[in-house]
Amino acid sequence: MSQEIYAEEIYVARPSMPPFDEFIEEIGELWQTRRLTNMGAKHKKLEEELRRYLHVKNVSLMVNGHMALELAIQAMRLTGEVITTPFTFASTTHAIVRNGLKPVFCDIDPDTYTIDADKIEALITDQTSAILPVHVYGNLCEVEKIRSIAQKYGLKVIYDAAHAFGESYRGTGAGNFGDASIFSFHATKVFHTIEGGAVCFADDEYGMDLYRLKNFGIRGQETVDFIGANAKMNEFQAAMGLCNLRYIDSEIEKRKRVYEQYVKRLTGLAGVRIMKQQSDVKPNYAYFPVIFEEKEFGATRNEVALQLQQAGVYARKYFYPLTSMYDCYHGRFDAEKTPVALGVSKRVLTLPMYGELEEEEIDRICRIIKHTGKR
Ligand SMILES: Cc1ncc(COP(=O)(O)O)c(C=O)c1O
């Protein structure tokens, strides 16, 4: 047995926490106001602060990123088919299907893992109403190409920006692209509210619809004119967000250090492909995906994952399988039609990535990887 087994366990993510006393102070007044949810003062304040931080016109907070996406789609009143990618988390595809729409899967770019914008047009039919691309691992999609395709065919665009918090492209905040962008503030994300999410958008009327949709479709005391959901962020979540937002720049800076340490140790290793940072993008270092090429590396992604796991390191096959291959969609989609996505999903492993990951832990992870390749 390797002595690595006796070291502490390392998970793929570890939520950042604000100083305990600060959170207690932030929630203290809730014992007086007793306003615990329903768009209270903290909810309003967090929306304002996020608007400033993300440099977007409007932010509508939600209970989680998934409901943000479901309601962003519903408020857009889409019909028929939505072009998207299967190389994503369950949420993206489920949100389309749960809105009664048909996902049409486009392949991905082999370097950024985001939708291959050059393959979108061939998938457009008279049923297509929107494009729903994903900024995978914080890599931003080809937003300009996607915008011009959408304009040419009169399509809506909703970005799944769950991984792209705090990023910008040529100085424009990631939440400004398309008709709407959604963020996830799940505990494992760069910025979190325990569970939480938001929709960013420019159109105020669309914002009114979102507001009603997250509160049962209620327009007024006696008028309910939308089949809404309950997707309100509560005050405790918002308080966590207010605290975490004070530390977000230092969290991203810490992640940058982790990123650089991984790069230093893994660069040049035969058969190990590290994700490049995009030029023109201010990154957030949300994930550290690695592609393992079996022939050159000498081991498969699955073997690496297993060796890490046996040493108490829980990396993640993220995203595997493709959403189009899920059991719940059995027989409905053909993964062979997105061969690049299929290949990446079989070879990718996201390594532990969070601000507090220690240099010795990064050493330990990289040692196991190197050792697995040599066996
Ligand atoms: C790409 C993507 N979309 C949507 C979501 C859903 O967000 P949440 O977990 O906040 O509901 C996630 C969350 O992990 C995600 O990774």
Image (spheres, rainbow, N blue to C red):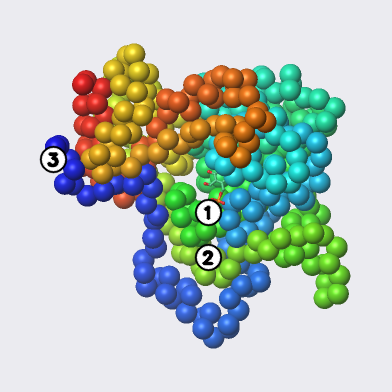
Image quarter where the C terminus lies is top left
Does residue 70 show up? yes
Q: Residue at x 58, y 68 (%)?
A: 234
Q: Secondary structure at mark 3?
A: helix
- Disc 2: which residue: 237
Could one spot residue 174 in this view of the protein? no
Picture coordinates of residue 56, whole percent (x, y): 65, 49
Q: Which residue is mark 1?
A: 185
Q: Residue at x 39, y 29 (%)?
A: 290
Q: Label 3 vs label 1: CA separation?
A: 36 Å
Which residue type carries mark 2? Gln
Circle nearer the N terminus (3, 1): 3
| C-alpha span from label 2 to label 3 | 40 Å
Q: Pick whichever of labels 2 and 3 is earlier in the sequence.
A: 3
Q: Quadrant of the N terminus?
A: top left
Asked if marks 3 and 1 touch (Cβ < 8 Å), the reply is no
Image disc number at residue 3: 3
- The picture quadrant where one finds residue 196 is bottom right
Indicate which label's residue lies in the foreground, 3 or 1: 3
The residue shown at (56%, 45%) is 162
Crowding at dot 2, Cα within 10 Å, few <14 / some 14-19 / many 20+, comes out as many
Q: Is mark 1 within 8 Å of ligand 1?
A: yes
Q: Distance of mark 2 from mark 1, alpha carbons?
A: 10 Å
Task: Please give left or right for residue 301 compared with residue 172 in the image.
Answer: left
Left or right, 198 with reference to 361: right
